[in-house]
Image (spheres, coloured by chain):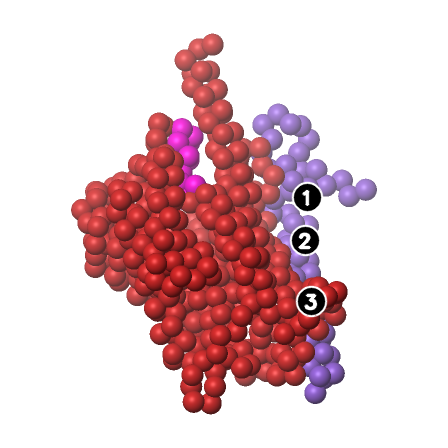
Chain colours: A red, B purple
Amino acid sequence: MSPEELEAAIIAANTINLEVYYYWCTGFMILIHAGFMMYEMGASRVKHTLAAGTKNILAFAYMIPTFWMFGWWIYLAMTNGFIPDFEAGAGGVPWGESMGPNLMDNATGVFWGAFTLFACTTASIMSGAVIERIRMTAFIILAVLLGSVVWILAASWGWHYQGWLVTSWGYHDFGASGVVHIISGFFALGVLIHLGPRIGKFNADGSSNVIVGHSLPMTMVGLMFIVAGFFGFLAGCLIFPGTPISWSATQWANIYGMPTTLSTITFNTLMAVAGGMIGAYTKTRDPFWMMSGALCGVISVAAGMDLYYPGLTFIIAFAGGVTAPIIARFIESKGIDDPVGAVSVHGYCGILGLLFAGMFLGGYPQFSPDIPTITFMGQFKGAIVMVLLGFIPGFALAWALKKMGILRASDAIQAAGMDVELEAVAYPEDIKSI
Amino acid sequence: MFDSSPIESWEGASAIFSFGAGSGMTIFLFWLTVVLCIVPLYYTLKTENRHEDNHK
């Protein structure tokens, strides 16, 4: 075998390995969706259980074709802001050569799949916040806007090596604290303002009542599924080495081209899960928040977990786990009913993730000397962009749906249970609706 | 029946999907996919409205 043939064989083997790697990342990420579904069904009362599960599954089902129709194109074309680059976006046009079986392109399908599952995650984050009162049609429309437009626009700006947040401010968001979690958390907040609370959540004097879901064990198991899914999610944030589309022949890189390792992500994912759980449990002694603390921990470190020392990861995650329940209570005190704490867990902890990365990672060089180094101000400005990009579309579309009268189910439907619209019951025998 | 192959040989083949990239048929199928996503939403809305009316 000649050296040229050997090199070609190595590249071919690496290309197949890349394909296999992202294929299984995508499979693992489906666990996140399954986990959110269990989490939200458990957090719902019996009469709303199937509606919560069905919305999760339909979000998944709608995200896939819509992300194929326009999501991937947005990622490739919108790196400069709101003006599309049609040449860059050509590879994402759904009738183009790369958007289907192609023997010369082993990468587009698996990358598209992984990004589609990120989109599904954003919809799952919102779906928990709106349980027990949002109508199915409105939810699907909101989910498609969030997952197949807004999050991927944020990714094009801040999760693409040519995105303007990266090239202008050195924005660093390895594990998507901003582009997934701030976006989803604040989109959900915009929706919640128009959707209103569940019946019985708030009293006339403004005080609130605890509405207990029907299966905390199901919620806890669901959160462990999400933790397992994070291994696919965060591994999918790495770029595989040794192929023509890789940053390096010999080492993993983040999405910006900065070298890192899969071991780094293993250290910091596990330390973040542990820190967040212990932090939230320390603060609340509440099983629900203990498990949500795992999410708080990972989200609080996600932006910088490719570079953090594991001890620092644990401390940041602990801080996220301790403070998120406080933020959740504050949001509730303002009359916002967020049954799963999505705004605090994802929105607030996402902000923490970006700001902590700015505090602790200052001075790290980028892959290109033309790009600014990581700075606190760069992260701070990036966080503001993410908050606005998430909140405004959610607020505006929910307002429009409310004006059309299709956002919120009537009080009578809520009293009967959202499952009546499905003409099915979750537990036909023995368990009474509450 | 449809004779959808865009290639005549596997030698040097790249995009191999039925009807081939960028053809009128792929664009038609794309728009059909769009319609098949929107129409069920209309029926979902009708079902919701029926249940809302039944619970007034």
Name the amino acid, label 3.
Ile
Q: Quadrant of residue A402?
A: bottom right
The answer to whether residue A302 is above or below residue A141 is above
Residue at (58, 72) in percent of width and height? A132
Q: Please state the horizontal and vertical placement of residue A215, each as a whole percent of the image.
A: 58, 62
- In terms of secondary structure, where does tag 3 sit? loop
Q: Specify start and end residues of the magenta stretch as a single range.
A: A235-246
Q: Are marks 1 and 3 on the same chain?
A: no
Q: How far apart are marks 1 and 3 (CA)?
A: 53 Å
Which mark, residue B29? 2
Q: Please state the horizontal and vertical placement of residue B53, each as a whole percent of the image.
A: 72, 84
Q: Which chain carries label 1?
A: B
Drawn side of residue A323 relative to residue A200, left or right: left
Q: How far apart are marks 2 and 1 (CA)?
A: 10 Å
Query: Which of B7 and A3 lies nearest the eye of the viewer?
Result: A3
Q: In which quarter of the image is residue A157?
A: bottom left
* Magenta segment main secondary structure: loop
Q: Quadrant of the C terminus of chain A?
A: bottom right
- In terms of secondary structure, where does tag 2 sit? helix
Q: Do labels 2 and 1 share a chain?
A: yes
Residue at (57, 57) in percent of width and height? A218
Name the amino acid, label 2.
Leu
Q: Please state the horizontal and vertical placement of residue B43, each as a whole percent of the image.
A: 71, 70
Which mark, residue B19? 1
The answer to whether residue A341 is above or below residue A172 is below
Give the farthest residue toward the left: A363
In the picture of the structure, the residue carrying the numbered disc 3 is A431
